[in-house]
Image (tube, grey):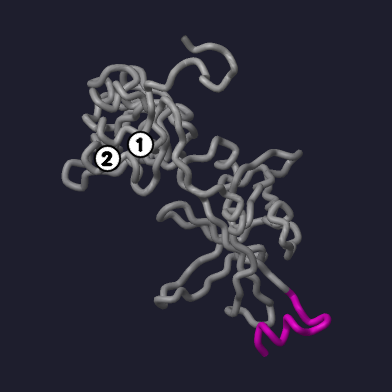
Amino acid sequence: MTYATVEASAAEGRPYYLYQFVEADQVWRFTSRAMDWTSAGSDGETITWEAAAAAHGDVVQTSDIERGRLELTWPLSHPFARRFLAPLGNTPVTLTIFRGHEQVLGETVAHWKGRVVGAEVEGVRILLNCESVFSTLRRAGVRAKYQRLCRHALYGRGCGLDIAFHWQSGTVTAVSGNALTIPEAAGQSDGWFRGGVLRFGGQLGFITGHMGSTLTLSRPMPEVAAALAAPEVNPETGADLPLVADIAPGCDLRAATCAAKFDNLPNFGGFPEIPGRNPFGGGSIV
């Protein structure tokens, strides 16, 4: 008996679902089955799917992109779902739902693919809002904007700066919510790292504030807090190893900052000399 045979039957199907979340190089896997489930990966490795009280709404096949959204329901206490209650980071979290049948365990098909765009609490549940991969069709084409501030993303293609040359290593000594204490950050003036990036392992965080040795992120990074609470130990000395993270400076997208801070004015994507009065507004600009 194959998946296609059971799927085509009128009443024999007993479907189960596998949920795979991917953020950069980190992967989480869950299953709607009552117990953990293992499967074989493409390279022969064993993949474990954690049992979770998760469920999703109906998958709708439609040309209306808005109706292609999907909602996943989780218990309020589930730690994975709770991480989405904080503001989302710059790295998208993609979701792939695989569908299988109990009669043919081990054979699944990709049922739905998209990304997590937000979360909300409803009673004792957390609702993860996801949009289909086809929602990318709504995006406007690439257009250069005529504006005073730089239109390029820092360290992006138009900016031209290589972030590899701007990383600075620092030791995380304290974590409180989305605020991290890194003494090395105090070596630069306040605001130097605002708008920059913090990297811990494969995780990236957007820095929204910098004052002294304190960096504020757009959302908490539970991985940093967990690593600080249970530090690695030097096998030779028995002492705790320092928790190291990398930080890169930010930019306020102004021409003066581009020149003085990064010496990158030739790639500046703004037009700071735009007149303050609209010449097409009907009034005299003389």
Left of 74 or right of it: where is 196? left
Residue lying at the far bottom in this picture: please name it: 1
- Image quadrant assignment for residue 79: top right
Residue 250: which numbered mark, if any? none
SS for callout 2: loop
For the N terminus, which image quadrant? bottom right
Residue at 21% over, 47% down = 235
Q: What amino acid is labelled 2 in the image?
A: Leu
Residue lying at the far top in this picture: please name it: 286
Residue lying at the far right in this picture: please name it: 10
Q: What amino acid is labelled 1 in the image?
A: Leu
Q: In x, y percent, where is residue 220?
A: 48, 34
Does the segment drawn in magenta span residue 60? no
Is 66 drawn above or below residue 268 in the view shown? below
- Name the residue beneath numbered marker 1: 154
16 and 235: which is toward the camera: 16
Q: In x, y percent, where is residue 74?
A: 67, 49
Q: In x, y percent, where is residue 25?
A: 40, 55
Q: Do the residues labelled 2 and 1 touch (CB within 8 Å)?
A: yes
Does the segment drawn in magenta span residue 13? yes
- Name the residue beneath numbered marker 2: 161
Q: Could you tell which of marks 2 and 1 lies nearer the N-terminus?
A: 1
Is 223 drawn above or below residue 180 in the view shown? below
Check disc 1: other Cα within 10 Å, few if <14, some if 14-19, many if 20+.
Answer: many
Residue 175 in view here: no
130 and 260: which is toward the camera: 260
SS for callout 1: loop
Q: Give the range drawn in magenta.
A: 1-14
